Structure formats: structure tokens, C-alpha cells
């Protein structure tokens, strides 16, 4: 089977490489000549665990290549996957221009029975619209378009593809559905459910899935707010509700607000779809505002401990929107940095993988560090924004000695509370009351509290 992936980003590269590992012959095509020449030279332009190795293996086996020559790649392909970006427009609705352009680009070169498969996340009706775009070029010839939404997560993309919970394929004719089923046969044979629907249903499934997962996160973040003020512990509450199988334990980890290239833009697009079809998605509209407000609220929390009349320094540990990726799109760390800079705070930052991408956005406005300890040197407050394992193992004696101030904000609940307070630091975590530093004789260091801390439930650990 010959496949072409249009778009060699997180999804195109992972999907193409995984299909190659299942025995297909795959070409990944991208508009970016730099990206393609990097890939041809063995440099993988994104950080995704395991991907670089698998790409090398598949390229060496002769089943994976990279090209900017669309005509050559498309004309011999059985399946042409569109995996280009579908960003938000300024009004929140989806910008389908890359999908439409890709459809127009491939249309003249499609082989007689080729199937165009939309992998990008797109709103209901897009597959049918793409079919019309292609038909204009291929007057009179048959055109087959399927919708095959992708559910992988960055950071675990290969396993999410090869051991997916399900494969969803939307097709509006029987033979296209059968062809896609045969393409996915190796996964179906492993016991992975294959869900066959119309193209519109497949498109709606993708948005409904992301919206539901984002709602779970928004819900637990709201519960975390109550826990902080009521003296509860959100981890205990999440465990207590998540063990009910109707609720489930996944996606109940509170944090600084969801980010990434998908949940923020897909919830906005789903809400816009609801408005378009006169079926308002009130829950999702509220979730979007609450997630934005959360990011602003956490920034306020940090500003609240800084002395207003003096230039303060804050160290940000973690820039990626989650661990195990270098992706910073809509990361909570970015909006925090923007707010702090606006308030005249000096910002130093570290991330094991995402520094370069964040640096492209903020340049010299932020001081960039090679290791977390150099970032925290002289900082009045430190904020952990991404759940990288290396932050869990921070040497707190060293960190506390290097800091100028005493406030550690752990927005991923990575650290052990009593270890932090035992090192003379205030511990601000998510969904648990503020904890005061312990002095050497084991009592509370409350005398160090500033007025900005009043009004928040606090305990000594
Ligand atoms: P990305 O920005 O990483 O990659 C998109 C690539 O497409 C870019 O390299 C761009 O140069 C290329 N491109 C754009 N127009 C092109 C054209 N006409 N011809 C050739 N190349 C073109 O995007 P991504 O994160 O891989 O996401 C792609 C789609 O998949 C989006 O719709 C997204 O919502 C969806 N999705 C993403 C994820 C994820 O985890 N990133 C997961 C599931 C679904
Ligand atoms: C998400 C979905 O999980 C994938 O199924 C989907 O394919 C993808 O979007 C997409 O459509 O692009 P991804 O954005 O890679 O995947 O990462 P997630 O692990 O879902 O995390 C998204 C955001 O939610 C991150 O900021 C993460 O920190 C946050 N999150 C996640 C929480 O705050 N709590 C949780 O319990 C889980």
C-alpha cells in the first residue's frame, strides 16, 4: 500500500512513520523545504519520544521518505492523508485554509482510485466540502474522501497510534469504508475497535472527544479551587471520584489550565460550530472562559507575593504545554510570562526541550537558562509550569539556597509538600491550601507572611 502524508508535523510524521512500521510505503510531503531537508538529513524537527529512532529505522528499511515534490508523491499513492494545521481564526472558528489549499494542490495528481483521507481535526461537513473542491479539478472523475480523525497525544504519540483505544473512520460510500478497514487491518487484528461512521459523524466525534476531555480538566480545576479555600486535597478528591468507573481516573489531574495545539483551539471551534448550527454549547463556552481566567488567576497569585515597589525576579520551570514534548502552543507558561513581563517582572526560564520554541516568541525579553538551578538563582519566586520528571527530583536545598525569596509555586503538584516547607519555603500548590515554611525548630514561619497572603487558607506542614 502506498501512502502520502500532506503535512509533516506532529500528526503527519507520527502517522506516516507508524503506517510505515505496519508495512506501508510512505512519503511525507511538506511545504517547508527546511523541514523536509532536515528530515532527509536525519534531523527530526520535533521532540516526540521514540519518533526519531522509528523514522531512522523506517527510512533505512526503504519504507519512509520525505519530499517537497507533491506531484511525484501523490500520483502513485493509494491513500493521500491531509494532516495540515487547522488553527483558530481570530473569532475562534476554525481556519480551514490549509486543508482547502492541500485539497487543491493534490487534486490534479490523484490516481484513479486514490482515497483522500482527512486526518486534520476539522468541523462537520469538511470532508464533503473537500470532495467538492477536488471534483472541480477532476471533472467527471470519481472522487473518494474519508474522514479519519486522530486521537494521539503529544509525548506518547507512537503508542497512542499503534495501541489506540479505537480507530474512527468516516466514509460516505461503502467501498471507501472497506478500503480504510483494510488499511487498518494490522491494528484491527490486534483487537483495536474500528468504528465506521459517516464523514460528518467522524468529524463530530473528534471534537466531542476533545471537548469532553477538556471538560473533565476544567471540572477538576474548579474542584481544586474549592479544595484550596476549604482546606481539602484535590488529589484525594480526584482519586475518590475517579475510581467510580462511570467517571474514570484519567484527565482529572488539576493544573495551570489546559494548553497545547488542540484543546484550546478545538473547544473554540466546537463552540463556534454549535453557534453555527443554532445548538449553543453552553458548557464549552463557559469552559473556554474559565480556562483563560484560570491562567490569569494563577499569574495574579504569583504577583500577590512580590513586593510591588521593587523589580522582582520570577523563575519559570517548564515552558512546554505538558511534559515529553517541545510544543509550546497555547502553553500556560507563555501567558504567565506575558503577564509577568507586562507587570515589569524580570523573568528567567528553563525547559529541557521547549526552550528554543519559547525563545522564538520572547527573544531577549526573557533570560534563558540551560539548567533549572541557574534559572532560580536570585529569584523571588519560582513557578513549576510543566510536569517534567527532572523537576520532581530538584535538589531543594540547592534551590532554596539559590533563591532570593521564599515562594515556590508548584502548578503541577510535583513535589512533596513537607519537603518544600522543610526547606524554609512557602509551598503554593494546586487544590491544597497554601503551606507555610517550617523553621528549624519545626514551627511555622508565619512571621514571614506578607499581607498579600491573607485571605487564603493556610496550614503548616
Ligand atoms: P503542525 O503544525 O505540527 O504540522 C502541520 C504541517 O503541515 C506543517 O509542517 C506545515 O508546513 C504543513 N503544511 C501546511 N499546509 C501544507 C500544504 N498545503 N502542503 C504540505 N504541507 C503543508 O500540526 P499538527 O500538530 O501535526 O496538527 C495537524 C492537524 O492534526 C491539526 O488539525 C490538529 O488539530 C490535528 N491533531 C493534532 C494532534 C497533536 O497532538 N498535535 C493530535 C490529533 C490531531
Ligand atoms: C489532546 C488529546 O488528549 C488527544 O487525544 C488529541 O488527539 C489531541 O489533544 C489533539 O486533538 O490534538 P494533547 O493536546 O497532546 O492531546 O495532550 P493532553 O495530554 O491531552 O493534554 C492537553 C492539556 O491538558 C495539557 O496542557 C495538559 O497539561 C492538560 N491536562 C491533561 C491537565 O491539565 N490535566 C489532565 O488530567 C490531563
Image (spheres, rainbow, N blue to C red):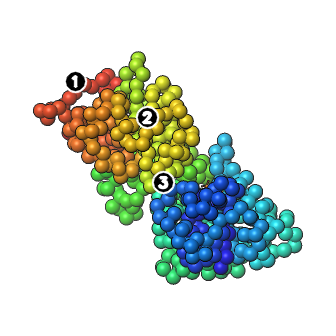
Disc 3 to disc 1: CB gap under 8 Å: no
Residue depicted at x 48% and y 79%:
191
Q: Quadrant of residue 140?
A: bottom right
- Which callout, 3 or 2, points at the residue further toward the start of the chain? 3
What label sits on residue 447 in the rendered view? 1
**Label 1: how many residues lie within 10 Å, few (<14), some (14-19) or many (20+)?**
few
**Label 2: how many residues lie within 10 Å, few (<14), some (14-19) or many (20+)?**
many
Label 3 within 8 A of ligand 2 by Cβ = yes
Nearest to the observer: residue 332 or residue 253 = 332
User: Which circle, 2 or 1, is nearer the viewer?
Assistant: 2
How far separated are the C-alphas under marks 2 and 1? 28 Å
Which quarter of the rendering shows the C terminus?
A: top left
Residue depicted at x 47% and y 67%:
159
- Which callout, 3 or 1, points at the residue further toward the start of the chain? 3
Q: Quadrant of residue 99?
A: bottom right
Nearest to the observer: residue 421 or residue 376 = 376
The x, y position of residue 117, in whole percent, is 68, 68
Using residue 232 as the reference point, say whether residue 58 is left or right of it: right
Residue depicted at x 47% and y 58%:
155
Q: Which residue is mark 3?
A: 325
Residue 249 visible, this angle: yes
What label sits on residue 348 in the rendered view? 2
Nearest to the observer: residue 83 or residue 74 = 74
The x, y position of residue 38, in whole percent, is 61, 58
Work out whether 309 lies above or below 454. Answer: above
Secondary element at tag 1: helix
Amino acid at each position: 500500500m502506498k501512502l502520502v502524508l500532506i503535512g509533516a508535523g506532529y500528526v503527519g510524521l507520527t502517522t506516516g512513520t507508524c503506517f510505515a512500521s505496519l508495512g506501508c510505503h510512505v512519503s511525507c510531503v511538506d511545504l517547508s523545504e527546511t523541514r523536509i531537508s532536515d528530515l532527509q538529513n536525519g534531523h527530526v524537527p520535533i521532540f516526540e519520544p521514540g519518533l526519531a529512532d522509528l523514522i531512522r529505522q523506517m527510512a533505512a528499511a526503504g519504507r519512509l521518505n520525505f519530499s517537497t515534490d507533491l506531484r511525484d508523491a501523490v500520483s502513485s499513492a493509494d491513500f493521500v492523508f491531509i494532516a495540515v494545521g487547522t488553527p483558530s481564526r481570530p473569532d475562534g472558528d476554525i481556519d480551514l485554509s490549509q486543508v482547502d489549499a492541500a485539497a487543491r494542490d493534490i487534486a490534479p495528481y490523484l490516481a484513479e482510485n486514490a482515497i483522500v483521507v482527512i486526518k486534520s481535526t476539522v468541523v462537520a461537513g469538511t470532508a464533503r466540502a473537500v470532495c467538492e473542491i477536488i471534483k472541480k479539478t477532476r471533472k467527471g472523475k470519481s472522487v473518494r474522501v474519508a474522514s479519519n480523525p486522530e486521537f494521539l497525544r503529544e509525548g506518547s504519540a507512537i503508542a497512542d497510534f499503534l495501541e489506540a483505544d479505537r480507530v474512527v473512520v468516516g466514509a460516505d460510500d461503502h467501498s471507501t469504508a472497506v478500503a480504510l478497514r483494510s488499511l487498518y487491518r494490522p491494528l484491527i487484528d490486534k483487537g483495536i475497535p474500528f468504528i465506521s461512521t459517516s464523514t460528518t459523524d467522524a468529524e463530530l466525534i473528534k471534537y466531542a472527544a476533545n471537548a469532553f476531555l477538556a471538560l473533565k480538566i476544567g471540572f477538576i480545576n474548579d474542584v481544586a479551587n474549592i479544595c484550596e479555600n476549604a482546606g481539602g486535597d484535590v488529589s484525594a478528591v480526584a482519586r475518590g471520584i475517579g475510581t467510580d468507573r462511570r467517571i474514570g481516573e484519567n484527565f482529572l489531574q488539576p493544573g495551570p489550565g489546559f494548553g497545547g495545539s488542540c484543546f484550546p483551539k478545538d473547544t473554540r471551534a466546537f463552540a463556534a460550530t454549535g453557534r453555527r448550527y443554532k445548538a449553543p454549547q453552553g458548557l464549552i463556552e463557559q469552559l473556554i472562559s474559565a480556562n483563560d481566567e484560570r491562567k490569569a488567576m494563577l499569574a495574579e497569585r504569583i504577583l500577590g507575593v512580590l513586593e510591588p515597589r521593587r523589580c522582582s525576579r520570577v523563575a519559570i520551570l517548564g515552558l512546554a504545554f505538558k511534559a515529553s514534548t517541545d510544543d509550546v502552543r497555547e502553553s500556560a507558561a507563555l501567558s504567565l510570562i506575558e503577564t509577568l513581563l507586562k507587570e515589569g517582572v524580570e523573568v528567567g526560564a528553563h525547559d529541557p526541550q521547549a526552550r528554543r520554541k519559547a525563545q522564538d516568541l520572547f527573544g531577549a525579553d526573557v533570560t534563558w537558562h540551560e539548567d533549572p538551578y541557574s534559572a532560580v538563582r536570585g529569584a523571588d519566586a519560582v513557578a513549576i509550569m510543566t510536569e517534567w520528571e527532572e523537576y520532581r527530583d530538584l535538589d531543594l536545598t540547592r534551590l532554596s539556597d539559590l533563591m532570593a525569596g521564599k515562594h515556590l509555586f508548584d502548578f503541577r503538584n510535583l513535589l512533596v509538600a513537607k519537603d518544600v516547607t522543610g526547606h524554609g519555603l512557602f509551598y503554593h500548590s494546586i487544590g491544597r491550601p497554601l503551606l507555610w515554611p517550617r523553621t528549624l525548630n519545626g514551627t511555622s514561619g508565619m512571621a514571614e507572611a506578607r499581607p498579600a497572603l491573607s485571605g487564603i487558607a493556610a496550614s503548616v506542614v
